[in-house]
Image: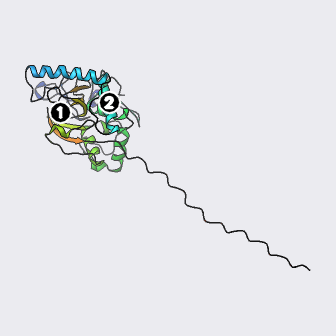
Amino acid sequence: MRSAPGNRPCALLAGGAALLLAASVGCGVPSGASRTAKPAAAEAGSGAARAARGATQAGASAQGGEKGPSSGSPFLDRLVEAAVERTSHQVRYDQSYFKISYPGGDVPAEVGVCTDEVIRSYRAVGVDLQKEVHEDMARAFDAYPHKWGLTKPDTNIDHRRVPNLMAFFERQGAALPVTSDARDYRPGDVVTWDLGGGQTHVGIVVNVPSPADEGRFQIVHNIGAGPKMEDVLFNWKLTGHYRYTGPPPPPPPKSPPPSAPQPSPRAPRPTRPR
C-alpha cells in the first residue's frame, strides 16, 4: 500500500526543476524516471556510442549463458548472475513509501528504486536484507543515520535507504577501501555514490568488462530508467565499497551434556544356609 500523496518522499527543487529528492529511499532521479547514466569520463563522442552498444551486447551475452570472470566466491558469482538477470525486468522508478510484509516483503514488482535492485538480487540468492537490516537496527538503532525523523526501526523502508545499507554493510565488516583503481572493484561488490544535491545511489559490480576498458567492470543499477548494466563506476563520487556475502551461518546446536554414570546395581548378598 502506498503512502498518501502528501507523504510521498519527493519534492520539486526551487525554480521548478523536476528533481526528486531522496527523502525516503536515498535515491534520486528526475521526474518521469527518464534519467540515464552519462558516459564514462574517459569516453566522448563516438566512443560513448560504442560503449553503449557494447554494454547492450555484453548484457545479452551474459544473459545468454556466456560466463564472465569469476569473483572467486560461489556466493558472489550467484549474486552477479542475479543482478544481471534483473536487467531483463521492466521497472518504473517510484520513490513512494509502501507498506510491505515482513520478512521477505517487497514493493510491487513493476516499481522500485536503486536499492530495490540490490535487495532483489540478494534475495534471489537467499539473503533477505529487509530482515538483516531490521534485526541489526533493532539491536543498535543509534548506529544508523537519523535523517528521517524516526525513533524506531520501520521494516517497510529502512532497508530501502542507501545510508542505512551503507551503515549495515559497515557494521557487518563488509566495507572495503574506496579507491580510484578500477581493479579494486570485483564482481559482486556493492558500491554507493553521492550524486550531488543530497542524492545517493547504489549498484552492484558485475562480471562484464567495460567495452572501453577491460580492467573496469560494469554496474547493474537503477538510476531512473529501470535496471540497467552500464559502465558508470566512476561517473559520480564514490562513497562506499562493500563485499557482503550474507549473514554468518548459525552456530551448530549444542550437544546435550553427557548423562551422569549410573551406579552399578548391587549384587545380592549371599544367604547362609540354616
Q: Residues within 10 Å of mark 2 (few under 14, many from 20)?
A: many
The picture places residue 73, in percent across and down from the top left corner, at 32, 39
> Looking at this rendering, what residue extends furthest in the right direction?
274
The picture places residue 65, in percent across and down from the top left corner, at 32, 24
Q: Is residue 32 visible?
A: no
Q: Which residue is mark 2?
A: 81
Q: Tell me which corner region of the image, top left, top right, bottom left or bottom right, holds residue 47.
A: top left
Q: Which mark is residue 216?
A: 1
User: At 30% across and 39% down in the image, what residue appears?
Assistant: 72
The picture places residue 83, in percent across and down from the top left corner, at 30, 30
User: At 72% across and 68% down in the image, what residue appears?
Assistant: 265
Left or right: where 110 falls relative to 255: left
Q: In what quadrant of the picture does the C terminus appear?
A: bottom right
Left or right: where 59 falls relative to 50: right
Picture layout, residue 83 above or below residue 270: above
Task: Estimate the spatial distance between the alpha carbons at disc 2 and disc 1, rounded to whole Å.
Answer: 18 Å
Q: Tell me which corner region of the image, top left, top right, bottom left or bottom right, holds residue 122.
A: top left
Is residue 27 or residue 250 the one in the foreground?
A: 250
Q: Residues within 10 Å of mark 1 (few under 14, many from 20)?
A: many
